[in-house]
Image: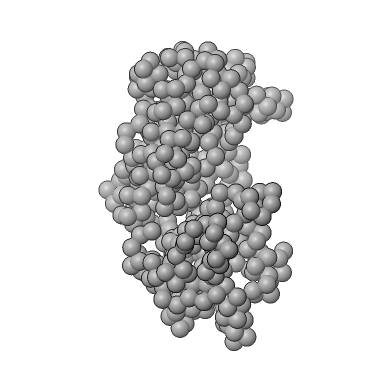
């Protein structure tokens, strides 16, 4: 946890933003896998962590904006439980570490909220993403389970998004720890890869690095020779000469701040000529996008700059043709770059995705419906304190090639006769994490290999 004063100040700013009513926080509970005592690894709700910092299950809290009171609700462990867990701090001790002096048993929450409802006071809650919370809201607030999402408070959402989007110096330092560990994960994989290994061997190695650093993974590891599947979590393939390996993984610190890096590197000790050609284009797009990051610049423009750079490089390879500005405007480049350039990052690897991309990355404005562009998670003008990823890529998806060619799509821009030769390529992407500063930006974490020479130097050992 940060110092108690950090959480006190955050809660005070939040209360001032919402102005009236009660703010309800539901911490996460344990989630059984196949029976009650065999649970998934516990992960606390990120907004709960941001305002309270207490990383244990079974807690809830209320900020009474009108009465300027904050209370944490939860039950101390019984002796039977302590036999299995060992001694744990009391709820009062946990709350005190967060700067909260008022606590009560979990059952008391129902009465507090019931009194507020009887008095006609607004009770604000955030969009639930777990069914356990939808059920809890039904019982506490009388909200039908199927309508729990619709009853979430937009005032609460906007206030949280505005605060969590702007990272403080202590948050940036914690994120940078995560990025440093993430760099170590990628360098370890680059040094290890060789023909005959399995994808699962690489996934295990990077997981080991994250765990040994005292934290964990910020998301399930993507470690694959089939990089054309953008979120490929299968690790069942064996590496062979000629394969290009794609690694997308990041560390999460003990305080649950995330890092998120992507790399592409050859299973051989050097890139072959085709791999070099594609990788150079991805790197050019990455460098152009990173250079464009600065306050006031809409990230949508930076995304389109990366798309234009990719299209230009592919035209040089004979894979695209025609007016490239028009090709990007119509979305023809999405044959090769089907996703968005980046996203916000912090306590979540896709920061606050549960609160809605339209609020986090679009300031409430609608998203595009165009294939490719609709997957852009961040479009708004950038501001100092934002932490985001920059992650251009090129992916050759055989099914997409087959369908678009069969539908006669973008024949003015895509050279399908040349494209067939790349159907077995896979995919490549490069990702780094940036802080937007008042002057421009800063790449977070220690340097990581990204040029062809840097990657090959590690591959050769």
Residue nearest the observer in this picture, 100 or 293: 100
**Residue shown at 62% from the left, 46% from the top:** 369
**Residue shown at 69% from the left, 52% from the top:** 35
The N terminus: image quadrant? bottom left
Picture quadrant where residue 420 is located: top right
Quick one: which residue is furthest to the bottom in this view?
A: 119
Is residue 7 rendered to the left or right of residue 372? left
Residue nearest the observer in this picture, 221 or 323: 221
Picture quadrant where residue 458 is located: top left
User: How many discs appear?
Assistant: 0
Residue nearest the observer in this picture, 348 or 97: 97
Query: In the image, is residue 349 above or below residue 99?
Result: above
**Residue shown at 69% from the left, 48% from the top:** 34
Quick one: which residue is furthest to the left in this view?
A: 439
Query: In the image, is residue 88 above or below residue 394?
Result: below
Residue nearest the observer in this picture, 209 or 266: 209
Can the viewer see residue 389? no
Q: Position of residue 123 (x, y in %)?
A: 57, 75
The C terminus: image quadrant? top left
Is residue 79 rendered to the left or right of residue 436? right
**Residue shown at 58% from the left, 78% from the top:** 108
Applied colour scheme = one colour
Q: Position of residue 290 (x, y in %)?
A: 37, 38
Is residue 249 rendered to the left or right of residue 418? left
Query: In the image, is residue 333 above or below residue 437?
Result: above
Q: Position of residue 104 (x, y in %)?
A: 52, 76
Can the viewer see residue 133? yes
Q: Position of residue 169 (x, y in %)?
A: 31, 54
């Amino acid at each position: 946890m940060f110092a108690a004063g950090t959480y006190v100040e955050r809660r005070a700013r939040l209360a001032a933003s919402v102005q009236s009513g009660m703010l309800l926080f539901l911490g996460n509970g344990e989630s059984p896998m196949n029976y009650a005592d065999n649970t998934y690894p516990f992960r606390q709700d990120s907004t709960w962590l941001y305002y309270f910092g207490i990383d244990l299950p079974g807690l809830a809290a209320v900020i009474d904006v009108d009465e300027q009171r904050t209370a944490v609700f939860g039950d101390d462990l019984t002796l039977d439980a302590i036999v299995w867990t060992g001694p744990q701090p009391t709820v009062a001790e946990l709350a005190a570490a967060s700067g909260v002096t008022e606590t009560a048993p979990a059952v008391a929450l129902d009465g507090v909220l019931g009194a507020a409802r009887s008095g006609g006071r607004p009770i604000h809650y955030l969009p639930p993403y777990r069914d356990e919370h939808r059920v809890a809201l039904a019982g506490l607030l009388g909200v039908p389970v199927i309508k729990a999402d619709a009853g979430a408070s937009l005032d609460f959402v906007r206030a949280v998004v505005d605060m969590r989007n702007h990272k403080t110096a202590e948050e940036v330092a914690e994120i940078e720890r995560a990025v440093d560990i993430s760099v170590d994960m990628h360098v370890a994989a680059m040094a290890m890869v060789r023909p005959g290994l399995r994808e699962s061997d690489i996934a295990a190695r990077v997981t080991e690095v994250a765990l040994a650093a005292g934290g964990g993974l910020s998301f399930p590891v993507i470690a694959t020779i089939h990089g054309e599947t953008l979120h490929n979590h299968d690790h069942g393939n064996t590496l062979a000469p000629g394969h290009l390996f794609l690694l997308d993984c990041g560390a999460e610190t003990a305080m649950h701040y995330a890092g998120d890096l992507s790399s592409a590197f050859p299973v051989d000790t050097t890139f072959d000529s085709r791999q070099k050609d594609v990788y150079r284009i991805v790197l050019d797009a990455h460098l152009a996008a990173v250079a464009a990051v600065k306050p006031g610049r809409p990230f949508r423009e930076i995304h389109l700059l990366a798309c234009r750079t990719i299209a230009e490089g592919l035209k040089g390879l004979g894979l695209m043709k025609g007016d490239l500005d028009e090709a990007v405007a119509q979305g023809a480049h999405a044959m090769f770059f089907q996703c968005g350039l980046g996203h916000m990052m912090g306590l979540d690897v896709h920061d606050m995705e549960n609160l809605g991309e339209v609020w986090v990355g679009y300031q409430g404005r609608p998203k595009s419906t165009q294939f490719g562009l609709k997957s852009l998670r961040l479009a708004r003008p950038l501001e100092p304190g934002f932490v985001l990823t920059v992650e251009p890529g090129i992916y050759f998806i055989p099914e997409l090639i087959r369908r678009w060619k069969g539908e006669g799509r973008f024949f003015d821009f895509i050279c399908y006769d040349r494209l067939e030769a790349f159907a077995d390529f896979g995919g490549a992407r490069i990702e780094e994490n940036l802080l937007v500063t008042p002057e421009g930006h800063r790449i977070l974490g220690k340097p990581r290999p990204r040029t062809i020479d840097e990657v090959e130097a590690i591959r050769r050992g």
